[in-house]
Amino acid sequence: MAGVYIHIPFCKQKCSYCDFHFTTNQDRVCEMINGIVKELQMQKEYLKGDLVQTIYFGGGTPSILPYEEIKRLLETVYENYPVTPDAEITLEANPDDLNREKLLAMKNAGINRLSIGIQSFHNENLKLMNRAHSAEEAKNCLELVKETGFTNLSLDLIYGIPAENHTIWQKDLAAALAFHPHHISAYCLTIEEGTALANWIKKGSFQGVDEEFAAQQFEILMDTLAKNEYEQYEISNFCLPGYYSRHNSNYWKKGKYLGIGPSAHSYDGESRQFNVANNTKYLNALAEQRPQYLYEMLEPQDQVNEYIMTSLRTQWGCDLQLLQANFKHDLMAENTAYIHSLLESERAIIRDNHLILTNKGKLLADAITSELFLVKQ
């Protein structure tokens, strides 16, 4: 399985928490689309003929584009790569970009999965995050999605937003579930360097929540979605049966993927490429027929650590036999005492030779994985 990711580096405005690569200046949209088309053509050998089963438009805000541009990019993928007939084709979207006409056009262009950045149904939270839509716009948009016949809908939500109690978060979850989405991605509000939130904290005008408050909201998230029959197949991702994000699951299972556009990453099973995170440099390099990216050949130790990190975030867990067969690494033998402590404290289980984190373990996933990493000598 292989995937193609296309990064659209444009947004209407900057969310206060966002540190992704994008610009709010849309003067060069047409030039950027031409550049992305060119890179798709130039990189067509990267996946070595592997069948493309997922295409993902991320950003930035892909829904900011006219549907004709999305259609053009899709046609370029189909012209240059072998794509399976049942490919999952996802578009990230914001509620304020979508109307009935655009939804129908996107569907006709080939988009069969929408990932909509709701973040919250509470207007004060949306203002704090500097989102361009209101709670009412979000709800109206989701009604339109249902009416236009999309059968694979994912919503993004954010928790860990300062509040007196958990009432707003519980209401956000209830509002989301009222629309019966097939998939929900929920992320804790994090303070990234260089964002508006980080600057507000430095100035003393904003204070984030403590770890305990955020952990309680994560537990509410897990409990609420489990009661509504959603599977937590990755720490931040939940779905109704059969509605895993095939694209993101490919990342977590170490499948190949090609990243197109400024700041996009690629992985071919042995090495990584990181496109330059600068629109001008990206376009200039393409004009000179030389895509600009950093290249990293992964050492066996790096591959082991990456596999441990990604696999432990999923419901399938870390395949101990795979580590032994592919990398000659016996995770149990190297970490006997620590893994036994995880089992005894009910933070992990071993099932079918897979080390799997429990709900208690998921609260400490980053700390647990770092303890299991191979350390460079």
Image (cartoon, helix red, strand yellow):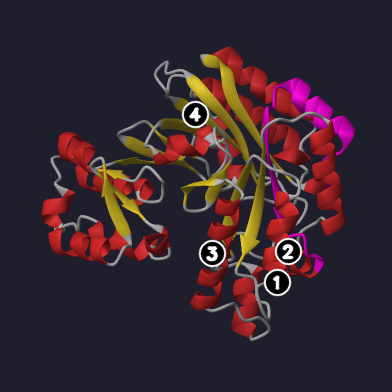
Q: Give the amino acid type for the residue marked by disc 2 in the picture.
A: Lys
| Residue under label 3 | 218
The range drawn in magenta is: 96-123
**Near-viewer residue (5 or 218):** 218
- Residue located at (62% from left, 64% from top): 159
Q: Which of marks 4 and 3 is in front?
A: 3
Quarter of the image where the C terminus is located? bottom left
Q: Circle 2 — which element?
A: helix
**Quarter of the figure with residue 359:** bottom left
- The label shown at residue 3 is 4
Q: Circle 4 — which element?
A: strand
**From mark 1 to mark 2, how far is it between C-alphas?**
6 Å
| Residue under label 2 | 171
The earlier-in-sequence mark between 3 and 2 is 2
- Residue located at (54% from left, 30% from top): 288
Residue count near mark 1 (Cα–Cα under 10 Å), binned few <14, some 14–19, many ≥20: few
Q: Circle 3 — which element?
A: helix
